[in-house]
Image (cartoon, rainbow, N blue to C red):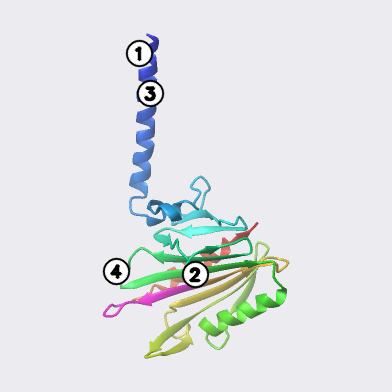
Amino acid sequence: MKKTYLISSTLALLVILGGTFLVRGIGQPDDIALSDRFTSSFLQEDLKTDEGFHFFESQNGHYSMWYPEGFYLQDEPPSYISKDHYELLNLYEDGTDSNGIERHIQIRYESGISADLVETNLNLLLKDTAYNDEYIELDHQGNKIFHGSSYQIIDEKNVHTLPSQDHDANRYFALVVNQNKTKHISVYYRLNCLEQATCKIDTKKEESFFETFINHIEFR
């Protein structure tokens, strides 16, 4: 009777685990963030986020964020670098959407620096992405956030930056700074249009996505 009981318990456990794996598989069948071994190693699925995101913990342990579904993390230098005072991440969307848009997010974390470097990095963001140095400044849960958007087109080798008020923005940027300005994160979000594609951008959706992303960066 004892041997029979042990076999039954094992079978019951396998059924329970099998059901759990099946539910997870049905709920998230095509999310490369979970199927990619390197990317998934940073994700903590037991911590709750909104739909479309996972909880992400940095390798150096100095910040966390909500990581978007459908993106994988490049795992080799120079696209990925992790040190105690510096971390560089490049997130790539798995393929393109139905409009021929491919998305890329670059994140750069820095700490142990002077407050002057915060202003320097903000100026770099504005120079690379902003139209006429335009940006919005806000306070959010102890962080100072400088962010904005623009529309960029490439004419041969020249980059032209236009206001997002007149076009559907394809570039977003943000600088997220902690309260005492000892840590900050630069964020670039690019929507790239493939040739011979419609590239219709849902501006409200992209704005909501980016705001959710930068609002859930937390420093440790």
Front-lying residue, 133 or 204? 133
**Could you tell me the amino acid type at mark 1?**
Thr
User: Tag 4: Cα neighbours inside 10 Å, few (<14), some, or many (≥20)?
Assistant: few
Q: Is residue 44 found left or right of 113 in the rendered image?
A: left
Mark 3: secondary structure: helix
Q: Tell me the residue that label 1 is attached to.
A: 4
The image position of residue 194, as x and y in percent, is 31, 77
Q: CA distance from mark 4 to mark 2?
A: 23 Å
Q: Which residues are magenta?
A: 189-198
Q: Nearer the viewer, mark 1 or mark 4?
A: 1
Q: Quadrant of residue 121?
A: bottom right
Q: Nearer the viewer, mark 4 or mark 3?
A: 3
The image position of residue 203, as x and y in percent, is 43, 74
154 is within the stretch colored magenta: no
The image position of residue 53, as x and y in percent, is 46, 56
**Could you tell me the amino acid type at mark 4?**
Ser
Front-lying residue, 34 or 216? 34
Is residue 166 in sight in this rendering?
A: yes
Q: Tell me the residue that label 4 is attached to.
A: 98
**Could you tell me the amino acid type at mark 3?**
Thr
Q: Quadrant of residue 60?
A: bottom right
Which residue is situated farthest in the top direction here? 1
Q: Tell me the residue that label 3 is attached to.
A: 10
Mark 4: secondary structure: loop
Q: Is residue 166 above or below residue 179?
A: below
Q: Earlier in the sequence, mark 4 or mark 3?
A: 3
Q: Is residue 57 found left or right of 193 in the rendered image?
A: right
Could you tell me if the residues under marks 4 and 3 are in contact, i.e. CB atoms within 8 Å?
no
